[in-house]
Image: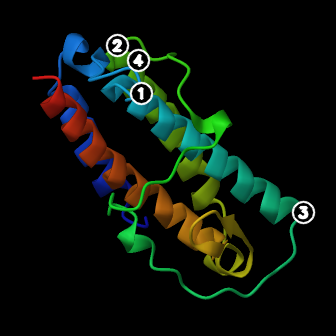
């Protein structure tokens, strides 16, 4: 569904290739560790799913155009995470990250499997970069966002060598 599982599997495979030490190291004070990046993915997915659910329950139907969300993995354009989506250090091990990501994905799939495609296409809320996006594109965005941060995870580990 929306390529979410294939993209997530790449993140899981990478996390599983790391030791807890590798995953917790930070190249510098201003850079997230791999575990912090994974926590951000967990927080972001939960936030998006809550917004999708809230929008369906109380939002207005809004027609919107398709956005080029497939460009999300391009990290040449930096975007700062909102304060509530920044990691707080809750993931202490790779296993914590894997379990958190599993929980957020279960919630996502449960919500999406119970919604009509037409509903996901006819409601929207704004993205800080792309503007107004349909709920369907928001669901797909989760995977593209994860690929963006998978590259960040790899860069982080490389910098720590």
Measured Cα–Cα span from mark 4 to mark 3: 34 Å
Q: Residues within 10 Å of mark 4 (few under 14, many from 20)?
A: some
Q: Quadrant of the N terminus?
A: bottom left
**From the viewer's perspective, is 126 left or right of 106?**
right
Which quadrant would residue 54 be assigned to in this image? bottom right
**From the viewer's perspective, is 25 left or right of 57?**
left
Q: Secondary structure at mark 1?
A: loop
Please name the residue that numbered disc 3 is placed on. Answer: 58
Q: Nearer the viewer, residue 79 or 109?
A: 79
* Mark in front: 2 vs 3: 2
Measured Cα–Cα span from mark 2 to mark 1: 20 Å
Task: Indicate which disc, 4 or 1, sits on the residue closer to the N terminus.
Answer: 1
Q: Position of residue 90 (x, y in %)?
A: 52, 16
Q: Nearer the viewer, residue 103 or 90?
A: 90
Task: Indicate which disc, 4 or 3, sits on the residue closer to the N terminus.
Answer: 3
Vertical side of 6 occupied by 70: above or below: below
**Residue 96 badge:** 4
Please name the residue that numbered disc 1 is placed on. Answer: 30
Q: Position of residue 3 (x, y in %)?
A: 36, 64
Q: Quadrant of the C terminus?
A: top left
Marks 2 and 4: CB-CB under 8 Å? yes
Q: Secondary structure at mark 4?
A: helix
Please name the residue that numbered disc 2 is placed on. Answer: 93
In the orientation shown, which residue stands out farthest toward the left? 161
Measured Cα–Cα span from mark 2 to mark 3: 38 Å
* Mark in front: 2 vs 1: 1
Vertical side of 74 occupied by 155: above or below: above
* Mark in front: 1 vs 3: 1
**From the viewer's perspective, is 127 left or right of 144?**
right
> Residue at the location (48% across, 65% down)?
140
């Amino acid at each position: 569904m929306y390529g979410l599982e294939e993209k997530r599997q790449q993140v899981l495979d990478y996390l599983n290739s790391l030791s807890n030490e590798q995953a917790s190291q930070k190249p510098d004070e201003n850079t997230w560790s791999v575990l912090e990046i994974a926590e951000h993915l967990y927080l972001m997915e939960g936030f998006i799913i809550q917004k999708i659910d809230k929008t369906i329950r109380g939002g207005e139907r809004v027609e919107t155009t398709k956005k080029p969300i497939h460009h999300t993995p391009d990290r040449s354009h930096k975007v700062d995470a909102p304060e509530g989506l920044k990691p707080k250090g809750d993931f202490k091990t790779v296993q914590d990250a894997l379990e958190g990501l599993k929980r957020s994905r279960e919630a996502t799939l449960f919500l999406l499997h119970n919604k009509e495609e037409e509903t996901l296409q006819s409601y929207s809320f704004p993205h800080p970069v792309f503007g107004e996006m349909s709920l369907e594109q928001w669901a797909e965005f989760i995977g593209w966002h994860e690929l963006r941060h998978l590259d960040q995870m790899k860069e982080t580990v490389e910098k720590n060598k």
